[in-house]
Image: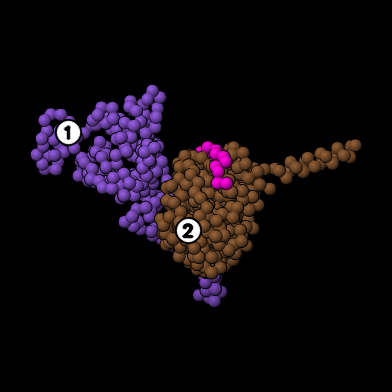
Amino acid sequence: MRRLLMVFVDLLLLTVVFAAHADEAFVTAQGADALDIIDAATMKPLARLPIGGKPAGIAVSRDGARAYATSPEGKFLTIVDARSRKVERRIDIQGGPLGVAAAPDGRHVYVADLYGRRLVEIDPEKGETRGVGVGAMASGVAVTPDGKTILVADRDDNAVSVIDAATFARVATIPVGRHPFGVTIDAAGARAYTADVESDSVSVVDIAARKVVATLQTESRPYTVALAGGRVFVANQHADSVSVFDAATLAPAGVVKVGEYPEGIAASGDGTRIYVANWFSNELWAIDARTLQVVGKVETDDGPRAFGSFVRKSD
Amino acid sequence: MSSLTRRAALFALAALAPLASATLAADAAPPVPGPNSWAAHGAAPLKSVETILIDAPPEKVWAVIGDFAHYDWLPGVLRVEASGGNAPEQGRRKLVMADGGAVGETLVRWDAERMTLAFHRDHDDVRRLPAINYMTHVTAKPAAGGKTLAEWKGRFYRGHPFNDPPKGLDDDTALTAVTALHRANLAALKARVEGGSSPLPACGERARARGEASACSGGAMRE
């Protein structure tokens, strides 16, 4: 009997350990100079960390250990211990650090300097290690799942820079639509999607072939792209909407009306939902990726941008 | 110089070179803003929301704010030259200012059901308003007692399009200026709707400004 009880308790403990946390959204609230950490399953705020320097870009490491927030006005990167929800350290970065992405192995973070035509490589322990020249007004950054290739949206060049992560050299540039801002890579590392703000489009890039294979028409001023449930989701900032496309056929699959001035968009860990930060109305919304219904809303601190990969996936 | 010293010097140069190139990259001239100022702005968009209570039903307020071509009631505006009516992307207007300048705006959204419209400034003039990429939203919202809460809000960036802005072109200056503009516009709207008139220039002044004779007979003229 006692033994059965012990087994039962063990199982209960295991359940608690494995269901330790649901997805969390790490939302940079630029107007409030803060980072909001939100339980994405219940859409309830968990914590608010003061960051400073007008934080905008965000990347959560694949293992969920750390979150990286860029402050383009303050010119620094803040490294956050995502488990304890504490600021670990700040690393100064010249120019205007905005776009940020974490390498899959967690050993490096890549930050694009908006004003300095640079992509910098940061070792979270040591600081800036290398830099490489990219294009004008370098914005969004994304890394392939194998960690070998980094893409940077060179906004004012209407192109994407391709960086070899090992040598940290720029190996190519790919012309895309007008003013690419966010760039997102799929789970297979095969395709990248740029949100082309001024051409109201998404450019679908074949990464290996280094060229655009399709262009999708969105609504007004698309800023960012998320991939979930076999679909492509695009936040259209001036249309207060999210455009949806089938990722395989690229056929339009609907438009979802969201809050005011949506910017950051990201998928849940299991791909059943996407989350979008509405910058003007100060809300994070959850949308069911299959039904396209709005399933949750939570108020954030002022000016949520969440520009980057802002979901910390549940264990 | 001995070969050892030379080697050490070369080694030092090689070690410092990446640092030098990084510095050079950082000091590289920032991109020059093109004629379309949507192309260049800082990294922090700003917002300003102001409201005013108007003693009139929302329909009456919407009749004024929804008429994109006839915003001559705005402070400092002499007259409005407009085309395209209230069609988004086609509705365009030039606010001819009493100070001799002009402000061009394009309508981007017009929704009679929600009583809201949105428009943006076509070109930025930081001497007139130290803010760029300025988009405005004006809305008539129902309030208690059959009144209207008129909302004037905007999204914009500071006047200096890159980092390290000089004083006068920084975020605080932009916020202060745009907030003051929104408040002044709402006050003018309230006077216009409630009083049937607005703080217009004195009778005949506009005609004189155009160099014309006026048929002013003492009452306020609506042109």
Image: magenta residue range: A291-301
User: Would residue B107 be seen by someone viewing this image from the given angle?
Assistant: yes
Q: Indicate left or right for B208 with A116 as reference.
A: left
Give residue A129's position: percent from left, percent from top: 56, 60
Label 1 neighbourhood size at 10 Å, few (<14), some (14-19), many (20+)? some
- The residue at the point 29 percent across, 39 percent down is B67
Chain A shade:
brown
- The residue at the point 32 percent across, 38 percent down is B66
Residue furthest out toward the right: A1
User: Would residue A129 be seen by someone viewing this image from the given angle?
Assistant: no
Q: Are marks 1 and 2 in contact (CB under 8 Å)?
A: no
Q: Kindly indicate which chain is depicted in purple in the rendered structure.
A: B
- The residue at the point 60 percent across, 64 percent down is A148
- Which residue is label 1 attached to? B221
Q: Is residue A146 above or below residue B158?
A: below
Residue furthest out toward the top: B145
Residue type at mark 1 is: Met
In three-dimensional space, the C-alpha distance between marks 1 and 2, rounded to whole angstroms, equals: 52 Å
Residue B69, picture quadrant:
top left
Secondary structure under the numbered disc 1 in the rendered image: loop
- Which residue is label 2 attached to? A216
Q: Which chain is home to disc 2?
A: A
In this view of the protein, which residue sits in the foreground, A154 or A211?
A211
Give residue A27's position: percent from left, percent from top: 54, 44
Give residue B174's position: percent from left, percent from top: 36, 42
- The residue at the point 85 percent across, 39 percent down is A6
Residue A200, picture quadrant:
bottom left
